[in-house]
Amino acid sequence: MYAKVCDIEILSSYISDVSVGDLLTVQALVTNPLDWLHFYEKISVIKHGDRTNFMVVTAEGDRLAGQGDVTEVEKWSNRGQYGFKIKINIRKQKSLTDRRTRAPPGTRKVVPIPVVHAEAPLVAAAGRLVAPEAPVATADDIASFKDMLKGSLAMDMTA
């Protein structure tokens, strides 16, 4: 999980609860006092009614982005544990999951990547240095490779 609310980035190690509906609620628990100082400085600036952008990635991998108004900001400390809760009244919300998982058809291009061996010497051709042709595996090479793999797990698997 991940949340970016009111210019505060909250990683999954801090998030204890996220709920999304008409209200977005992000609750975090911080155990490190130095981290708490970082969050406290940013939370102290947030006021009731402030407009903010948000982005949330849920545990299921859904990405939500939008805008809203801050309705509540709570912060607390309890015996070395610190926490805060931010509630946002959502005005605009957009799911980014579809954009992330689906690309329009025909936009993906497969580009072959040439393999250049580092130990191959460079050959001067037409005034520039180029790598020599890559060796081609012969039937004898393949047969010797199969002999080498006999008895291994790779040969026991059926295709």
Image (cartoon, rainbow, N blue to C red):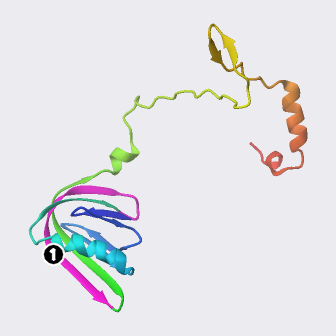
Image point 88% across, 27% down: which residue? 140
Residue 9's image quarter?
bottom left
Work out which quarter of the rendered image holds the C terminus and state it: top right
Is 41 magenta? The answer is no
Q: Position of residue 84 (x, y in %)?
A: 26, 78
Instruction: Answer above or below: position of 46 versus 84.
Output: above
Q: Residue at x 82, y 49 (%)?
A: 156
Residue nearest the observer in this picture, 87 or 60: 87
Q: Is residue 72 magenta?
A: yes
Read off the residue under disc 1. 72
- Residues shaded magenta: 58-78
Q: Position of residue 148 (x, y in %)?
A: 89, 41
Q: Which residue lies at the image location 83% right of the left edge and 24% below the top edge?
A: 138
Q: Secondary structure at mark 1?
A: strand
Residue 37, quarter of the rendered image? bottom left
Amino acid type, label 1? Glu
Q: Tell me residue 147's x, y (percent).
A: 91, 39
Name the image quarter holding the N terminus: bottom left
Q: Is residue 30 visible?
A: no
Q: Crowdedness of circle 1 by 10 Å Cα count: few (<14), some, many (20+)?
A: some
